[in-house]
Amino acid sequence: MPATVVIGGQWGDEGKGRVVDFFARNCTMIARYSAGSNAGHTIVNGLGRFALHLVPAGIFYADKTCIMGNGMVIAPQGLIDEISMLESRGVDMSRLKISDRAQLVMPWHPVIDRLDEAMRGENAIGTTGTGTGPAFIDKAARLGFRMIDLVSPDPFESDEFDRKLKWVLDYKNLVITQLYDGEPLAFEAIRDQFHYYSDRLRQYITDTSILVQDAHERGEQILLEGAQGALLDLDSGTYPYVTSSSPASVAAGACIGVGIGPTAIRRVVGVYKAYQTRVGNGPMPTELFDQDGSALREHGVDRGAGEYGATTGRPRRTGWFDGVLARSTARQNGVTSVALTRLDVLSQFKSIKVCVAYELNGQRIDALPASLHGMQSVQPIYEELPGWGDEVTEARSMSDLPQRAREYVRRIEQLIGAPIDMISVGPEREQAIVTRDIFGQALG
Ligand code: GDP
Ligand code: IMO
Ligand code: MG
């Protein structure tokens, strides 16, 4: 059976957690393939409201295997806290498997993340401060610790862990003190912490690529959960204001991040918000600084459902739907199905704008330039559509939607250039309209 990838089509926070929680019912295995606790995936279901940073969003189904792939960077204490939180709320965690090749976020990574941002000053990226970027930098620098380092035969008995920690920590302390003028970290405390992590996490760590490959060969449906969004991707995003994940936060990274070949992937679900948000710094052509922008951000804020980061609590920047960027990410990711989220948030507007092209130096263009100056200089060309006024949170089929809401959805579909197969009209699991059963229907 082909695997299905779920990616974010914008700057993250499109509702990937919500969409994975919805589609997981059709699959036997859900595997996250990239990033770390910079991600915050919100799921609202019968057990309550959850913001998951590391554990795949499929964990709420008792019969699904959940994989944390080799493409992830994992903060062990954060993971232990997340596992404990889920257990305390009645979720069975025995189905969680962690790749032995996944990288570890080490104690120096969040320290360096924050010191580096301070050093950049006005050029700061606006990272989540979780150490995710520095952990990926060390992966590429071949300085990383991996899950296997916690469990390879007796790493603590044999001094294997201590020897590696000693030289890497000496190196990192030099960087912290000499480059950033920060405080060095102590060896013993880290060693003892990681001994505990080894005991606590050992039961979950295995070669997960074999599990995914076996499930694929058995013909099972596998859902590959992406993090961030395509516009935060290191290669295709709004560089340098991107995240540092490798494999990338695009669909093509999913194979590398779980250890399967590209031929296994046949469907790519692109999750798009019905408007645009971004958290952190960097260009955002359709950003709004007016009343409409705050209306997008504050909708549902009294229920804890406004546009505030699930990881850092920062207010998200808001703007109208950017059709130029959406079309570009759909093409770069080979999106076969769109899940359009938060349509209900637009019910409050009398008229709604969508960006259909940009203007740059008096010319109409339909792609974002590569240069930072170009990205910051484009002016959106808008089309204005009438609002629909009525609430849509109870809609469960297209015919339940007001005519103008259907027209909005169809216009977004044209702009993206891929079919909208699911429309989310609220954060809860069943607040959705499915217009095509993507699992029931063979593709191409
Ligand atoms: P992710 O990082 O892509 O998983 O998205 P986040 O969880 O960071 O942010 C999405 C937010 O939108 C969460 O608070 C979700 O509960 C919420 N959400 C998802 N779909 C809908 C929807 O259709 N309507 C509303 N109102 N909220 C939604
Ligand atoms: P999910 O999976 C939104 C942003 C940060 C910052 C930039 C780099 O919830 O959609 P990093 O800490 O990764 O080095 O920060 O990327 N960012 C996200 N924005 N959603 C995310 O994940 C994000 N992960 C990183 O705000 O601008
Ligand atoms: Mg998020």
Image (spheres, rainbow, N blue to C red):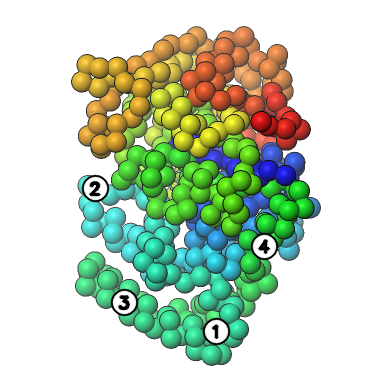
Q: Nearer the viewer, mark 2 or mark 4?
A: 4
Front of the two marks 2 and 1: 1
Identity of the amino acid at label 1? Pro
Task: Return the residue at label 2.
Answer: 123
Q: Assign a secondary structure to mark 1.
A: loop
Residue bearing mark 3:
171
| Mark 2 / mark 1, whichever is N-terminal | 2
Task: Kindly report the distance in space between the C-alpha atoms of the residues bearing marks 4 and 1.
Answer: 23 Å
- Work out whether mark 4 precedes mark 1 in sequence or the reverse, and give the earlier one: 1
Name the residue rendered at 31%, 21% in the picture.
Answer: 365
Of residues 133 and 237, the one drawn nearer to the viewer in this rendering: 237
Camera-near label (3 vs 4) is: 4
In percent of width and height, residue 62 lies at: 78, 53
Q: Which mark is residue 155?
A: 1
Q: Quadrant of the N terminus?
A: top right
**In this image, 133 relative to 195: left or right?**
left
Of the image marks 3 and 4, the number of the one nearer the N terminus: 3
Say the numbered circle drawn on residue 341. none
Rendered residue at 62%/18% (across/down) = 391
Contact between marks 3 and 1 (CB within 8 A): the answer is no
Residue pointed to by mark 4: 210
Camera sees residue 163:
yes
Indicate the amino acid at tag 2.
Asn
Upstream in sequence: badge 3 or badge 1: 1
Q: CA distance from mark 3 to mark 1?
A: 21 Å
Quarter of the image that includes the C terminus: top right
260 or 338: which is nearer to us? 260
